[in-house]
Amino acid sequence: MVIKVFVATSSGSTAIKKKQQEVVGFLEANKIDFQQMDIAGDEDNRNWMRENVPGEKKPQNGIPLPPQIFNEERYCGDFESFFSAKEENIIYSFLGLAPPPGTKETEKSDTSAETEAHTEHSADEGAHEEAQSPPEDQQEEEKHEEGEEKEEEGKQGEGEEMEEGKQGEGEEVEEQEES
């Protein structure tokens, strides 16, 4: 598979030149095989690029600006898409290539596979636990009751510091409130 980067070698826009240089420089630095396709000097390249950029990716004026990136005939994206993929360390999947061993993208795909397996295992355990545990309403009620018991224990601890006579009055008041 060949990555094709459509560029304009004689662009008057410094912004476009910088974007093109960043894409080409990144591909060269990472030893990713690609071809530069000049749209300024070759009308066939320009027409092919314009026809093959998907409609939703074209700007309002309908003419996509370079750099545009393809893997053979498959559209990968423009500079913004490339930049996002690079920042997220998913450039190889963006380009439709298998990541080389030892890259962060390889590690991510390995980690996500492990996470999915762990999630499935946890879901199975969760289903088993659901069969054994009481309904959520009952669990919440039990937690609420435990909280009240702890609160009362705390009050009793404070009450022990009080004089016995006052504590007796407090109990009478509590009994009346309950009635």
Image (tube, helix red, strand yellow):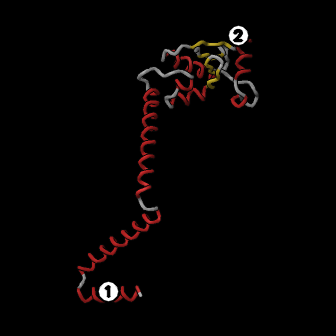
Residue at coordinates 59% horizontally, 21% vertically from top-left?
18
Between 108 and 15, the one lying in front of the other is: 108
At which x and y percent is residue 105? 47, 27
Answer few, some or many: residues within 10 Å of disc 1's Cα (few below 14, many 20 plus, some between 14 and 19). Answer: few
The amino acid type of the residue labelled 2 equals: Gly
Element at label 2: loop
At which x and y percent is residue 162? 25, 82
On-image quarter of the C terminus:
bottom left
Q: Which residue is mark 2?
A: 41
On-image quarter of the N terminus:
top right
Q: Which residue is mark 1?
A: 171
Q: Is residue 111 left or right of residue 81?
A: left
Residue at coordinates 75% horizontally, 27% vertically from top-left?
62
At which x and y percent is residue 106? 45, 26
Residue at coordinates 52% horizontally, 19% vertically from top-left?
26
Element at label 1: helix
Per the model, the C-alpha gap separating discs 2 and 1 is 96 Å
